[in-house]
Image: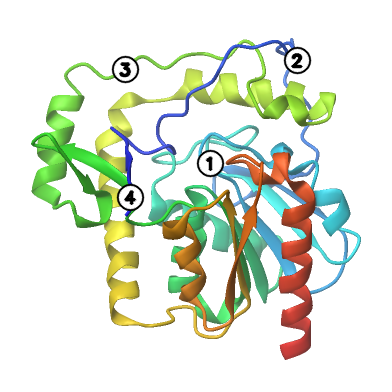
């Protein structure tokens, strides 16, 4: 089993490299989409194109809707695609706790419903959001017709260091996590503020680089380290539920079209294709974790394949 020995998840602590690239904007950039009120706070939603099923993108930790600039225009030529920013990301207002799984799922369902983005959906989950979209399907199975997982986080792929040993987050007990968090919160690491666009985001169009840098700096500045234990517990519960589901069901996603894209060979991530009886794994060779940037054609073709499969089975 390949396990990343993380002190906390990528969703709650993103690292940024200072390298040559776009400079921070002096003003808040104009959102490319619209701001949708979901009940006292607003989320940014950017839908382009027409057709069904609607493709809905869930960004990875520390990533934003603009990071799909190399994918969204092409996908919008054959169906509707919606990117958005989770609460407290980019233009979206903060919610109770950033990246708390149950809040992410409720927010997304409400956002789509209030925006008249009707199911069925093809969900795209990159990195940690592979967990989010699987959890969305677990709560709203009738709304999800297909899925593409882009170098996704496996529920057993991240670990906490408990008594000097890495234990997958899905197998950590509540008491073990509390013990870990008590020690962690004594001296949590400082959050670095990016001042240059890091790799691989320098591959984005220049305008998208500028927005990404603004959003990344805002995300880092607004981080509330006091939320970390609550985020950790929410993610522990999510991973445990998905682990239990995989243990109980041979194909938790049934027969829906599913493509899993991995950055190079990764047997653990590739095995997620078994979530569906119709699942398949694709290796993006010489790519990166953000395959939507390093290998946009691979991601576009995977989305088109799933969309076409859904259209053929409806």
Vertically, is 247 above or below 2? below
Give the Cα separation between the discs numbered 1 and 4.
16 Å
> What is the C-alpha distance between the residues marked 3 and 2?
26 Å
Of tags 1 and 4, which is closer to the observer? Answer: 4
Q: Earlier in the sequence, mark 1 or mark 4?
A: 1
Residue found at x 58% / y 19%: 217
Q: Secondary structure at mark 2?
A: loop
Residue under pointer 1: 87
Return the residue nearer the eye: 39 or 153: 153
Query: Who is closer to the viewer here, 28 or 256?
Result: 256
Residue position for label 3: 189
Task: State the separation of the CA atoms marked 1 and 3.
Answer: 23 Å
**Disc 3 to disc 4, how far (Cα)?**
20 Å
Q: Quadrant of the N terminus?
A: bottom left
Q: Is residue 127 left or right of residue 244?
A: right
Q: Earlier in the sequence, mark 4 or mark 2?
A: 2
What residue lies at 70% left-to-right and 50% top-to-bottom?
A: 83
Give whichever of 109, 229 is nearer the camera.
Answer: 229
What numbered label is drawn on residue 235?
A: 4
Query: Which dot marks residue 22?
Result: 2
Q: Residues within 10 Å of mark 1 (few under 14, many from 20)?
A: many
Q: Position of residue 143 (x, y in %)?
A: 59, 76
The quarter holding residue 206 reads top right
Give residue 278's mark.
none
For residue 27, side relative to residue 113 (left or right): right
Q: In terms of sequence position, does the residue under pointer 1 or pointer 3 come before the other?
A: 1
Q: CA distance from mark 4 to mark 2?
A: 33 Å
Q: For numbered disc 3, what is the local secondary structure?
A: loop
Q: What SS does tag 1 mark?
A: loop
Sequence-wise first label, 1 or 2 = 2
């Amino acid at each position: 089993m390949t396990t990343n020995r993380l002190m906390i998840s990528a969703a709650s602590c993103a690292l940024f490299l200072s390298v040559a690239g776009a400079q921070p904007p002096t003003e808040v950039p104009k959102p490319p989409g619209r701001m949708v009120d979901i009940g006292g706070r607003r989320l940014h939603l950017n839908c382009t194109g027409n057709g069904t099923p609607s493709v809905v993108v869930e960004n990875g930790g520390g990533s934003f809707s603009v990071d799909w600039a190399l994918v969204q225009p092409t996908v919008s030529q054959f169906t509707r695609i919606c990117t958005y920013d989770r609460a407290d990301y980019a233009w979206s207002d903060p919610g109770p706790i950033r990246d708390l799984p149950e809040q992410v799922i409720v927010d997304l369902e409400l956002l789509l419903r209030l925006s008249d983005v009707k199911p069925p959906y093809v969900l795209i989950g990159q990195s940690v959001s592979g967990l989010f979209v699987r959890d969305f399907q677990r709560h709203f199975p009738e709304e999800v017709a297909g899925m593409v997982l882009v170098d996704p986080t496996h529920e057993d792929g991240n670990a906490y260091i408990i008594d000097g040993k890495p234990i997958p987050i899905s197998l950590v007990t509540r008491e073990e996590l509390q013990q870990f968090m008590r020690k962690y919160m004594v001296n949590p690491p400082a959050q670095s503020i990016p001042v240059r666009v890091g790799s691989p985001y320098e591959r984005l169009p220049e305008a998208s680089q500028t927005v990404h840098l603004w959003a990344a700096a805002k995300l880092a500045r607004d981080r509330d380290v006091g939320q970390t234990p609550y985020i950790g517990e929410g993610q522990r519960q999510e991973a445990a539920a998905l682990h239990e589901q995989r243990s109980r069901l041979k194909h938790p996603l049934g027969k829906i079209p599913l493509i899993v894209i991995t950055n190079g060979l990764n047997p653990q991530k590739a095995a997620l294709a078994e979530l569906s009886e119709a699942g398949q794994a694709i290796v993006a060779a010489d790519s990166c974790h953000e395959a939507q940037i390093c290998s946009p054609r691979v991601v576009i073709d995977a989305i088109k394949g799933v969309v076409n499969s859904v259209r053929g089975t409806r």
